Amino acid sequence: MKRSVPWLLAALLIAGGLGEIDQYNITWDEASGDYFFGERYLSFFTTFDARYLDFRADPYPPGHVPDLSRSMRRLIPWEY
């Protein structure tokens, strides 16, 4: 019983986290640049389509989730 308590607590924490994962989103400071450029570079390297490297344009279709196109740092890629 003594050894099973940590495992039960870990399972409870994981179950609680998985139950809330659909409500998890990015915070205001995380999306300021890292996610925007990461998403663009991932899209480019998985498709090799150069339109993803035009940071002034929005190459994704309307309703794309998460919408990172309003990142305030999208025009300064040299900082990332």
Image: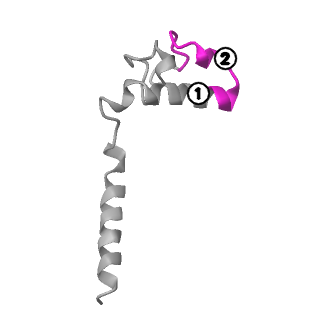
Magenta range: 44-60
> If you read the primary sequence from the N terminus, does the residue marked by circle 1 or circle 2 appear first?
1
Of the pair 8 and 23, the residue shown nearer to us? 8
Give the residue pinned by disc 2.
50
- How many numbered badges does the structure rendering display? 2
Q: Position of residue 30 (x, y in %)?
A: 36, 32
Asked whether, in this view, residue 28 is left or right of residue 75, the answer is left
Q: Residue at x 30, y 60 (%)?
A: 16
Image position, residue 54 (x, y; %): 57, 12
| Residue 41 numbered mark, or none | 1
Task: Report if residue 59 lies within the magenta region.
Answer: yes
SS class of the residue under badge 1? helix
52 or 16, nearer to the observer: 52
Residue 49 colored magenta?
Answer: yes
Q: How is the image coloured?
A: one colour
Q: Amino acid at mark 1?
A: Tyr
Q: Position of residue 49 (x, y in %)?
A: 68, 20
Q: Give left or right: position of 45 versus 8.
A: right
Residue visible at 52% across and 30% down?
Answer: 38
User: Which residue reaches farthest bottom?
Assistant: 1
Side (left or right) of 5 relative to 57: left
Could you say where residue 3 lies in the image, as x and y percent from the top left? Answer: 34, 86
Q: Can residue 64 be seen in this snapshot? A: no
Q: In what element is the residue under mark 2? A: helix
